[in-house]
Image (cartoon, grey):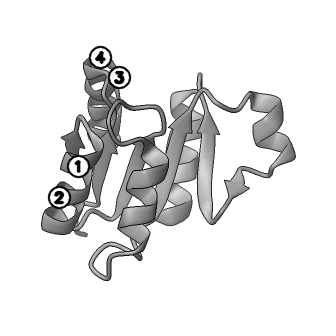
C-alpha cells in the first residue's frame, strides 16, 4: 500500500515539528511549508493527498492559501483541514466542523482527534 502524503503548513516551527513527528509515527509521509507561498508551490510540486493548514500566518493567511489551491486545477481536489484557534470547541461542534467546504479543527486538539479527521479523507 502506498504511503499517503500530507502537507503540513504552519509558521510556527515547533508546531511543524510536533505534527511531523505525530503523523510520521502514524505512517504518513510528511512534507512541510512555513508560509502560504511555499505551501502553494509545494502542493503543486508534491501533490499531497491532504493538506493541514494553519489559518493565522503572516503574509498570506490560510484562507487565501486555500482559495488559491481550490482555484488551481492541479490542487483543487486536495482536501484541506484548517487547524485554528479562531474557533472554540463549542463553535466547532455547532458548525459541524464543516465551513465553506473545508474542515476546521479547533486548537487545542488531541492526536486522536486529528488522526480521526485525517482518516476520513484518506
Question: Can residue 27 be seen?
Answer: no
Q: Which of the two labelled residues, at mark 2 and mark 3, occupies the earlier sequence position?
A: 3
Q: Position of residue 116 (x, y in %)?
A: 57, 47
Q: Nearer the viewer, mark 1 or mark 3?
A: 1
**Residue 70 occupies which quadrant of the picture?**
bottom left
- Circles 2, 1 touching at the beta carbon (< 8 Å): yes
Q: Nearer the viewer, mark 2 or mark 3?
A: 2
Residue located beneath label 1 in the image: 37
Q: Position of residue 58 (x, y in %)?
A: 35, 30
> Which mark identifies residue 41?
2
- Circles 1, 4 touching at the beta carbon (< 8 Å): no
- Circles 3, 4 touching at the beta carbon (< 8 Å): yes
Q: Which of the two labelled residues, at mark 2 and mark 4, occupies the earlier sequence position?
A: 4
Left or right of 11 in this view: 108? right
Q: Nearer the viewer, residue 29 or 54?
A: 54
Secondary structure at badge 4 equals helix
How many C-alpha atoms fall within 10 Å of the one at disc 3: few (<14), some, or many (≥20)? Answer: some
Q: Which of the two labelled residues, at mark 1 and mark 4, occupies the earlier sequence position?
A: 4
Which quadrant of the figure contains the N terminus? bottom left
Amino acid at each position: 500500500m502506498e504511503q499517503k502524503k500530507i502537507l503540513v503548513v504552519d509558521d510556527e516551527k515547533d508546531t511543524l515539528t510536533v505534527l511531523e513527528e505525530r503523523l510520521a509515527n502514524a505512517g504518513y509521509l510528511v512534507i512541510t511549508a512555513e508560509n502560504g507561498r511555499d505551501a502553494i508551490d509545494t502542493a503543486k510540486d508534491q501533490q499531497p493527498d491532504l493538506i493541514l493548514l494553519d489559518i493565522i500566518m503572516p503574509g498570506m493567511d490560510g484562507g487565501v492559501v486555500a482559495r488559491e489551491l481550490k482555484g488551481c486545477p492541479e490542487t483543487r481536489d486536495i482536501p484541506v483541514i484548517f487547524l485554528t484557534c479562531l474557533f472554540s470547541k463549542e463553535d466547532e461542534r455547532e458548525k459541524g466542523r464543516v465551513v465553506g467546504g473545508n474542515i476546521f479543527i479547533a486548537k487545542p486538539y488531541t492526536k486522536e482527534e486529528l488522526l480521526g479527521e485525517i482518516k476520513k479523507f484518506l
